[in-house]
Image (cartoon, helix red, strand yellow):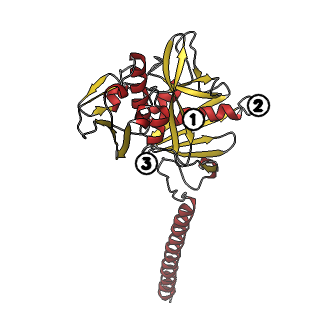
């Protein structure tokens, strides 16, 4: 009888042990599931990164909202004669004008006394080439030595700013053999080579026109090359435009005190400049001069558009340029 009782006790203990083991396994499984759930809840959600490497979804990383203003698509670039200490310089102006074209700009900028481009020539543009066909020769196309230099400076400067790469002169018979402004031309002219290296623009005020004009950095011998003897990049150009190297210069920086450049870059043909300004000291005229200078500077890089972001006024102005 004792053996039966003992066996019964052992069987009960065995069932109890199995039951406890089974309960422990279930508890362990539940604990493991709970831990996995907790870990998944602790994991941070994935964030979509934007193309600039910033993180989306984080309000602190979002760019501020700007009021976007789009300028008139067409523009005129004119060349002007500046007489300074018995030296002549070619300065430029840029104005948004719905009738603005390269042809009109060249005619308006022609410094020759006989107005050769309007009186004796037909102008036509195809892609990045300009054809100038003259209907006269000889004295009609003659100039003094001073006028010769100014004529070609204006022609190449304005053409370059409009993205023209090559100019072809034709005589009345349609042949490339003609003398224009004391220069014999019998082959296409490379605009970039003729104009020479230039970067940046600086200001001079014309009292007769009551207008601020712009001199190229190359014309006034400001820095146009970096330490590696390469032309300045766009960001380097904008930075250089904040200062004047020449002592006693008759021209000024287009970036007045109170305008602070935050960033300047060229990306896929779009020149972007981000800046702040002191509203108490920077006049609207100062801002206009600054924006015009940046447009001209961008055109030397064949930019298709200028984007100016004013952090102070939260404005983003878009200037279409070369198509």
Front residue of 317 and 103: 103
Tell me where residue 83 appears, x and y as whole percent.
54, 17
- Residue 267: quarter of image: top left
Tell me where residue 18 appears, x and y as whole percent.
48, 78
| SS type, badge 2 | loop
Residue at image coords 28%, 38% = 172
Lower position in the chain sequence, tag 1 or tag 3: 1
Distance Cα–Cα, label 1 vs label 3:
18 Å
Residue at image coords 35%, 20% = 229
Tell me where residue 176 appears, x and y as whole percent.
24, 35
| SS type, badge 1 | helix
Q: Which residue is mark 3?
A: 323
Q: Is residue 74 above or below residue 141?
A: below
Residue 226 visible here: no
Tell me where residue 79 appears, x and y as whole percent.
49, 30
- Residue 157: quarter of image: top left
Front residue of 10 and 3: 10
| Picture disc at residue 292 | 1
Q: Residue furthest right?
A: 280
Tally the marks. Answer: 3
Q: Please state if 265 lies on the left or on the right of 288 as rendered.
A: left
Residue at image coords 52%, 56% = 47
Front residue of 42 and 197: 197
| SS type, badge 3 | loop
Q: Which numbered mark, 2 or 1, is in the foreground of this view?
A: 1
Q: Which residue is mark 2?
A: 280
């Amino acid at each position: 009888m004792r053996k039966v009782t003992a066996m019964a006790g052992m069987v009960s203990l065995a069932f109890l042990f199995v039951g406890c083991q089974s309960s422990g396994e279930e508890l362990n499984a539940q604990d493991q599931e709970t831990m996995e759930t907790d870990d998944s809840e602790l994991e941070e959600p994935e964030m979509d990164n934007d193309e600039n490497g910033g993180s989306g979804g984080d309000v602190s990383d979002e760019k501020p909202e700007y009021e976007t203003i789009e300028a008139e698509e067409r523009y005129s670039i004119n060349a002007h004669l500046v007489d300074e200490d018995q030296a002549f310089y070619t300065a430029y102006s840029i104005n948004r004008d719905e009738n603005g074209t390269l042809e009109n700009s060249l005619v308006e900028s022609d410094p020759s006394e006989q107005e050769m481009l309007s009186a004796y020539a037909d102008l036509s543009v195809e892609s990045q080439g300009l054809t100038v066909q003259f209907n006269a020769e000889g004295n009609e196309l003659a100039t003094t030595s001073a006028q010769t230099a100014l004529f070609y400076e204006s022609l190449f400067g304005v053409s370059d700013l409009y993205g023209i790469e090559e100019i072809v002169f034709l005589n009345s018979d349609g042949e490339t053999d003609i003398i224009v402004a004391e220069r014999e031309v019998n082959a296409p002219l490379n605009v970039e080579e003729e104009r020479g290296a230039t970067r940046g623009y600086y200001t001079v005020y014309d009292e007769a026109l009551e207008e601020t004009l712009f001199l190229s950095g190359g014309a006034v011998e400001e820095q146009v090359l970096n330490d590696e003897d390469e032309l300045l990049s766009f960001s380097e150009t904008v930075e250089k435009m904040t200062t004047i190297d020449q002592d006693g210069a008759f021209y000024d920086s287009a970036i007045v005190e109170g305008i602070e450049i935050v960033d300047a870059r060229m990306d896929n043909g779009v020149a972007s400049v981000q800046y702040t300004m002191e509203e108490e000291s920077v006049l609207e005229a100062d801002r206009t001069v600054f924006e015009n200078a940046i447009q001209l500077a961008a055109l030397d890089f064949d930019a298709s558009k200028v984007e100016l972001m004013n952090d102070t006024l939260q404005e983003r102005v878009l200037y279409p340029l070369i198509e």
